[in-house]
Every structure is written in structure tokens, then in C-alpha cells.
Image (spheres, rainbow, N blue to C red):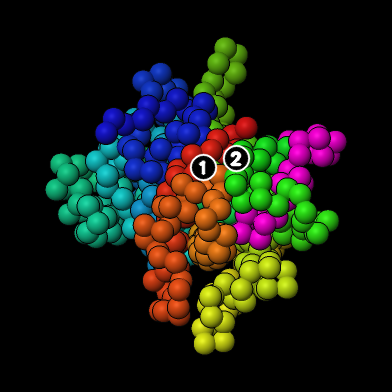
Amino acid sequence: MTDLILTPGDVSLAAWRAIYGGLGARLHESAAGKIAMSADAVARIIARGEPVYGINTGFGKLASVRIEAGDLETLQRNIVLSHAAGVGEPAPTPVVRLMMALKLASLGQGASGVKPETIALLEAFLTRKLTPVVPAQGSVGASGDLAPLAHMAAAMIGVGEIEVAGVRQPAAQALADAGLAPLNLGPKEGLALLNGTQFSTAYALSGLFHAELLYQSALVTGALSTEAAKGSDAPFDPRIHELRRHQGQIETAEALRRLMAGSAIRASHLTGDPRVQDPYCLRCQPQVMGAALSVLRQAAHTLLEEANGVSDNPLIFAGETERPDEALSGGNFHAEPVAFAADMIALAVCEIGSIAERRIAMLVDPALSGLPAFLTPRPGLNSGFMIPQVTAAALVSENKMLAHPASVDSIPTSANQEDHVSMAAHGARRLATLTANAENVLAIELLAAAQGCDFHAPLTSSAHLEAARTLLRRHVPTLDHDRWFHPDIAAAAELIRCGAVVEAAGARLPGVSP
């Protein structure tokens, strides 16, 4: 596959998604000039002999310690080795590759003082699919994602491990096998590689991509549940939502109308239905799911800004006419925007799963759904969907716990020099568990809703929803009697996770890019 060409500061969400999906990446040639100017500026700053943080001083609380010229390269190597202190399971390969691409685009803006050779090696990692093994735990989201990025940088200098074609190898061996030499870090380069929010941002983008598909899948399963319960599509009338004015709500209602259009099940109870209003889990789908869509879009906006920004420290500004070269210390490494975005995604995912579980509970209750108890033809002898609903409830309650905001926490580090941190890293990392839980909830809803519609035969739903139901039935037959339920849920979850359900439905569904 062709590598993506990144123009630093102007990379689309679709491009980041493609890298997450496995594409390689390298910088546009136009970035070379700024990169070289920034590296030259570092050399001139060193020549002045003035103390500059991270270039000829220690780090964090040790910033007042001056480092001699002969030790500057050792200083940069030491920061990588000492900061590679992560623990836990390795971060997933797609997340690490996205992290490297985000770092590449940040360095490519010419404000970090790294050499062209450093850029070239990072590009080689991405284009040749060399993935550093990065323990997932150890970052507090300021001063940057130090430990995870240190593991990335360690692999570049030949320390640690690199994954190649799914096999972990010593970094030095993997580099040699690829015909690459370990990087010799120059002044500022170790700090430039370590400082930044790329680990948190990569994980948050991963969560966003999965949450978007989750939202779209929930539209399909929610519409199918509405059909199973013989619910009304009147609450999706555009006039209702135009008065509320929320764009996410308007688009969600429109999508639900499209999904149900032409349904014979709906036509069968347009008149003579004694129910005046459906339960909230059916009637308020546009309001709840529309709010989730709006929140996901705001998170996408924040993360795209972060992905196209520079979160290094200090930042190098090459001298211009009548202005000297400058190294300015600031706080762009503080990942508070990413932490907020991750918390917003978590809230949306939690609510998507929560309202889906309520629909499952409604379907298995004959007093609410009008269907056989627990969606089994012979309740009593069979338990049907009794315990799958319990599983969904357990997953939703777990997600409520996981959705507690990470951004409101902080803990002082580095002898109180770094006294307020974002907790963006684990706030973003927990999105993987949240979305996986919600995917399983939707899998159970898909099974329950399809089972409910089976009781309406020979009436059928819309073409969109019948296509999704037909897909499911190719993998999971109707539940005529109790059987081992776990494989059914696993099969349905995979159809949700890979996007097959949304693809089968074939309707134009809203996404995080309006």
C-alpha cells in the first residue's frame, strides 16, 4: 500500500484513521527546510553558552544543573533510558504506529530542533512497519507522555524491543535486519522525542474511531429494536427535532427514519395501536444518541487540533531578521485538552450502551414488548434471553464506573516541579475497554431485536434493517430453544466490531465529521 504523505499541521482525521488502520506515513518534502533550520538553531543556541532547559541543563526538578558541552549527547541518551520506565501490557500496534505518526508530524513543524536523520529513522519505522514495544502504563499526561514515548525513542537508539510482523525482537537486532543504524541523539533530541501528548492522543483517537462505529451500529440495533417492539417512528418526525435545533439530534432522527422507511412491520400498526407513547429507550433515541453524536464531534475537533499541533518543550524558534534564535519553555506538553476529549468520548460511549441495555430489558419483558417472555417460544422450559440481558446490565454498570472523568484527577510529580497533570493517558486508554463493553451490549441487542422481529413473520422490516438481520442470520440462527449462548454473542459482537452490521444496513449514517 502507498504511504501517506503528511503535511505537518494540516493532516485530516481521515488520514489519521488510515494510519491507525495500517498505512505507513512520511513527511511531505516541504517540511525539510523547517526541520533543518530548527536543528541549526539549536547548534547556534549551544554555541552562545547560555543555559537552556533540556539542551544543556538537567530535566524537571534538575533543570538548574548545568551540563558540560562534552556530555550533551550523553544527557539525551540518559533521558531516554531513565524515562523508559513504563509497565503493564504493551500498547496495541495500531496505537503505537499512530503515536509515531503523530510524533513525526509534530517534529516536522520545525519547532523541536531534531536532525533530519532523526526524522528519516522515524519515517523508516512507519514505512517498514517496525513497531516499538511500548508498555501502556506510566504516563500522567504531563510533562508529556514521557514513559511511553521514551520506550519509542529507546527502540530508535537500539534499546528495548521492536515488533516486526507480529514477532518481538531485540531492538538492535530488528534495526540491523532492516539495514538501519541506531540513532545517535544530538542535543535536545531525546527530550524532543519524549515530550508531547502523542501517546494520549493516539489512544484517544483510537477510542474516537471505535466510538463512531459504535454510534452508527447503535442506530441500526436501536431501529431494529423499535421494530421488534412495534414501536412508533412518529418520534423521529423532523418537525420535532428542528424545534430543538441540536444538529446531532436532527441528523440522528433522520437516520432512524431512513433505517425504518418502507417497513411492513411499522405499516401493520399505524392504526389501531392502543399505545399512545413508547418507552424512552425507543422514543428518545434521537435526543440521547444525537447528544452523543454532538459530543463525539466536539471531541473529534479537539483531537484533530491536538494532532496537528506541537506539544514539545522547549520550543525552538529559528532567528529571523533582527531576532535571535530562541528556545522558549512553555507547557504545550500538558494534555488537558486530550483528557477532556477522552472523558467526553467515555460519557458518550457509556450512554450509547446504557440506552441500548434498556431496549434489551424492554424486549425481554412481555408486559412492555408484547413479545413472549425472554424472547423464547416456550418460556419456563427455556430461559431465552434472560441472562444475556443480565450480561448487558453488568457491562453497562462497569462502563458507568469507567466513565468517571479522568481529567478531574491530578497528582504532583518530579518533586512538585510538575505539580498539576492531566491524567490523559489512562483517560484515553480506558476507552478501549469502554467501547468493547458497549460493543457486546449492542451485540446482545442485535440478537434480541432480530429474535423479536422473527415473531412478527411473515411481516418484515425495511430493506435496510432486513439486510442487517439477514447478515446476522447467516452467522446465528433463530433461538428456537436454549443452547450455549456465548458463541452467539461472540459472533454478533464481531459483526458489530468489524462494521459489517452498518455496512449491511447500507443507510447513510452520520459520523464524527459532519
Residue range of the region highlighted in magenta in the rendering: 225-247
Check contact, mark 2 vs mark 1: CB within 8 A.
yes
Check disc 1 and report its element: helix, strand or loop.
helix
Taking the image as shown, residue 160 lies to the left or right of residue 460, namely: left
Mark 2 is surrounded, within 10 Å at the Cα level, by few (under 14), some (14 to 19) or many (20 or more) other residues, namely some
User: How many numbered marks does the figure carry?
Assistant: 2
402 shown above or below 277: below
The residue pinned by badge 1 equals: 463
Query: Which residue corresponds to the image point at 22% horizontal and 52% vertical from the top-left?
Result: 165
Q: Tell which circle, 2 or 1, labels the residue nearer the N-terminal end.
A: 2
The label number, if any, that marks residue 338 in the structure image: none
486 shown above or below 30: below
Which residue is more in the foreground, 163 or 482?
482
Tell me where residue 245 sits by quadrant.
Answer: top right
Taking the image as shown, residue 208 lies to the left or right of residue 367, namely: left
Q: Amino acid at mark 1?
A: Ala
Q: Amino acid at mark 2?
A: Gly
